[in-house]
Image (cartoon, rainbow, N blue to C red):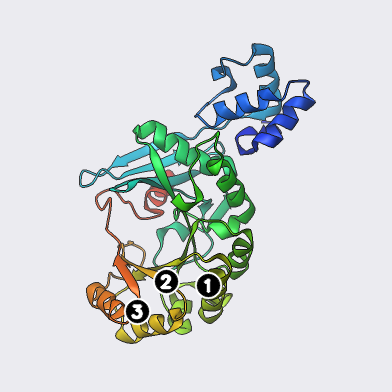
Amino acid sequence: MNEDTRADIRSMTIEELTAALKEMGEPSFRGKQVFAWLHHGARSFDEMSNIAKPLREKLGERFYIAAPRVERKQVSRLDGTTKYLWGLRDGNCIETVLMRYHHGNTVCISSQVGCRMGCAFCASTIGGKVRDLRPSEMLEQVMFAQADSGMEISNIVLMGIGEPLDNFDNVMRFLELVNFPQGMNIGMRHISLSTCGLIPGIRKLAELQLQLTLSVSLHAPDSETRSRIMPVNRAYDVEDLFAACHDYFRRTGRRISFEYAMIDGVNDSDRQADLIVKKLRGMPGHVNLIPLNDVAESPLKPSRRVRQFQQRLESQGVTATVRRSLGGDIDASCGQLRRKAMEMERE
């Protein structure tokens, strides 16, 4: 089969679309028309009813529209959390989770097919990284989760499969597209980006001065423990990570959220709570304590000291919350549904 050399039109900005259509001899307003169709869920050029058929055909020759297929969908009977396993154009699969909160509906999207970060407690990294997602493939997770569920999405978290800062340029393009007023128009203050601690990416993000929320997957405040459960710490040590976070706050004025999966006997001691307090001094940080999900392949178990750890932090002036567990009956933690699909393919 010949390789498809057409360009990915949904990853283009409105300026790029307008320029491409102008090159095709079309007036500039066509760019806005096509952009509107793309960002309101068009799955093919044939749906663009206010675009003449000859132009639709020319667009189809130069560009492609990819829309993911719902390979599997799980809806929690407990809280309505919905998990999607999407089939992509190249046969790979990714996951998206749609969660209901009192402040609005939040979608947790993937940024890569697989992940190469190797965190010991995460199912996403089993099998490693396959490839980066394109901007369109991140946008489509938001767009089609909203369309399928009928629920308006107001918040986005980039906390699904993959490391967003390991796919920096595509993620920045996605943020530009999803933020665009004539598109989905989801504001930066309603978007949270999670990183396991890629310091060069954090510094690049600080330069852009975006108003999003940066979430850092900390999971241990000391280098010995963090290196054991997060291989990234061997490249970017936690001491340097804290320094980068302090610099990020100084440059942006944005409070950082620190994600902390509570692991029994590994990172849940009073000593480690006190070390977090010490390292955050001088920077307003929020620590989000996460009750660990059991992953079959991992020997790590959920901590029995979550509340004590929270109280230890709060007694010393650090804001700490315990993440509400959602979708406990539907494999809602990252990577579990994709992993099961991969196992089924091998059988």
Determine which of the numbered discs, if any, sits on residue 285 in the image: 2
The mark nearer the N terminus, 1 or 2, is 1
Which residue is depicted at the point 52% across and 56% down? Answer: 211
Determine which of the numbered discs, if any, sits on residue 266 in the image: 3
Asked whether disc 1 touches disc 2, contact meaning CB atoms under 8 Å apart, the reply is yes
Identify the image quadrant of residue 60: top right
The mark nearer the N terminus, 1 or 3, is 1
Residue 106: x percent and y percent? 37, 47
Q: Amino acid at mark 1?
A: Cys
Left or right of 294, for residue 7:
right
Residue 65: x percent and y percent? 59, 30
Asked whether disc 1 touches disc 3, contact meaning CB atoms under 8 Å apart, the reply is no
Residue 15: in sight, yes or no? yes
Q: Nearer the viewer, mark 3 or mark 2?
A: 2
Residue at the spot of label 1: 245
Is disc 1 surrounded by few (<14), some (14 to 19) or many (20+) residues within 10 Å?
Answer: many
Is disc 2 surrounded by few (<14), some (14 to 19) or many (20+) residues within 10 Å?
Answer: many
Above or below residue 39? Residue 276 is below
Q: Amino acid at mark 3?
A: Val
Which residue is depicted at the point 24% across and 76% down? Answer: 305
The mark nearer the N terminus, 3 or 2, is 3
